[in-house]
């Protein structure tokens, strides 16, 4: 499983190298044709070099590179037409422009800019075929370049559709998770405020007969109010969807153990351990709820993406001044990130939840080859702000 990301990385690099080699072959064809035709055709391989450079630097100067290539290409075409030099549109130049068109359609924002650059690339290709080639070959070259441009536009549009669909799905997952957190905020606030109301009523009842009992009741009211404010500060700002279904905000360690037992009954064996020193009293109610959700989602991902896992290790322990939940599956034949196209949205939802309560999360391959989900949560004594959470603890 540890080798899966490396394989994907090598596939990407090899495909990029193959495209660059293809452009180099086209550039050699340009040089060969320039040696036969001489005169203005000598400038065509030089534009091909500019095109290859623009393609190599596309991630850093995507728009600037394609605009520079089109400007130089159009200028050379006008000069060649004015001097009556005829040859070919330029193989490497046209290939680089087509590849850049795919990248523009896929990544450039806003869409209006991408569309304008794509139309200009077609105009440049047609202008090159019309001004540089002999009259009897201009129509044929123009048709061939239009077909290639149409293919590039189709590929780029499809890739852009995939990117935007994934972004929309990620946004929907995050919004749903935030709405779920808002519902839990409502339940937690109601839980705390109910305690405050009960304490206030009790203090009013005993105030006349036992004034000395009012002070402890006021202390309890202040403590309950402080806990309620802490919970709301962590989750405030999330819109609550209307849902009148009854909910129970109280999640305990027994609920975590019961969740593990149910999973082990129908799947791989799970070793679940809660280290000494980690208590329910040290974790806020919303943290306990998020712990339950992360453990549930992690075990679900094991069953869904790693059906060949022999056993799962889960533990909750102290680390870095907080509590860390770690879930690892061993001897699995698949990687959750690559087991199905477009996956990984469960991880997005988990990360959104953990961050909302002041924690941080890491999901990925461990050095020993196991797949690991690790979530850090603050305790009541200290709640540090979230920061980058890398593999080592």
Image (spheres, helix red, strand yellow):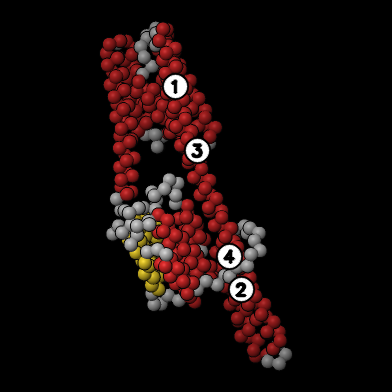
Going from N to C along the chain, the mark reached first, 1 or 4, is 1
Is there CB contact under 8 Å for labels 1 and 3?
no
User: Residue 222, how many percent across, how many down?
Assistant: 61, 77
Q: Which residue is mark 4?
A: 184
- Measured Cα–Cα span from mark 2 to mark 1: 67 Å
Mark 4 or 2: the one toward you: 4
User: Residue 145, how many percent across, how many down?
Assistant: 42, 20
| 285 versus 213 height, above or below | above
- Measured Cα–Cα span from mark 1 to mark 4: 56 Å
Q: Which residue is mark 1?
A: 147
Mark 1, secondary structure of its residue: helix
Mark 3 or 2: the one toward you: 3
The picture quadrant where one finds residue 314 is bottom left
- Measured Cα–Cα span from mark 3 to mark 2: 46 Å
- Measured Cα–Cα span from mark 1 to mark 3: 21 Å
**How busy is the neighbourhood of tag 3: few (under 14 within 10 Å), some, or many (20 plus)?**
some
Q: Which residue is mark 2?
A: 192
Q: Which residue is mark 3?
A: 161
Say if residue 347 shows up in the picture: yes
Going from N to C along the chain, the mark reached first, 4 or 3, is 3
Mark 4, secondary structure of its residue: helix
């Amino acid at each position: 499983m540890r080798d899966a990301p490396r394989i994907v990385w090598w596939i990407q690099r090899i495909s990029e190298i193959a495209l660059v080699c293809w452009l180099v072959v086209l550039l050699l064809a340009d040089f060969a044709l320039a040696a036969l035709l001489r005169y203005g055709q000598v400038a065509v391989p030089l534009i091909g070099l500019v095109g290859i450079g623009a393609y190599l630097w596309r991630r850093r100067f995507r728009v600037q590179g394609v605009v520079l290539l089109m400007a130089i290409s159009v200028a050379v075409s006008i000069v060649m037409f004015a001097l009556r030099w005829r040859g070919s549109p330029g193989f490497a130049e046209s290939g680089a422009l087509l590849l850049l068109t795919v990248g523009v359609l896929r990544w450039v924002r806003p869409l209006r800019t991408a569309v304008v650059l794509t139309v200009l690339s077609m105009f440049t290709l047609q202008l090159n075929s019309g001004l540089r080639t002999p009259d009897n070959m201009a129509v044929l070259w123009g048709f061939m370049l239009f077909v290639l441009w149409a293919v590039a536009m189709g590929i780029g549009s499809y890739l852009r559709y995939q990117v935007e669909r994934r972004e929309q799905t990620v946004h929907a997952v995050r919004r749903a998770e935030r709405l779920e957190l808002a519902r839990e905020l409502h339940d937690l606030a109601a839980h705390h405020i109910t305690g405050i109301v009960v304490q206030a009523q009790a203090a009013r009842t005993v105030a006349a007969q036992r004034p000395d009992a009012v002070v402890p009741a006021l202390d309890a009211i202040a403590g309950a109010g402080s806990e309620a404010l802490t919970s709301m500060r962590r989750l405030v700002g999330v819109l609550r969807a209307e849902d009148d279904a009854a909910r129970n905000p109280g999640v305990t360690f027994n609920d975590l153990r019961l969740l593990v037992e149910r999973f082990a009954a129908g799947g791989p064996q799970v070793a679940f351990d809660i280290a000494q020193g980690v208590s329910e009293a040290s974790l806020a109610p919303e943290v306990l709820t998020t712990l339950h959700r992360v453990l549930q989602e992690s075990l679900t991902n094991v069953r869904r993406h790693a059906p060949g896992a022999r056993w799962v290790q889960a533990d909750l322990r102290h680390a870095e001044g907080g509590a860390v939940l770690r879930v690892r599956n061993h001897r699995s034949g698949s990687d959750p990130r690559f087991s199905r196209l477009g996956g990984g949205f469960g991880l997005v939802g988990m990360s959104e939840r953990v961050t909302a309560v002041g924690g941080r999360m890491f999901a990925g391959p461990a050095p020993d080859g196991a797949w690991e989900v690790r979530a850090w949560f603050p305790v009541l004594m200290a709640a540090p702000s979230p920061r980058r959470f890398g593999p080592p603890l």
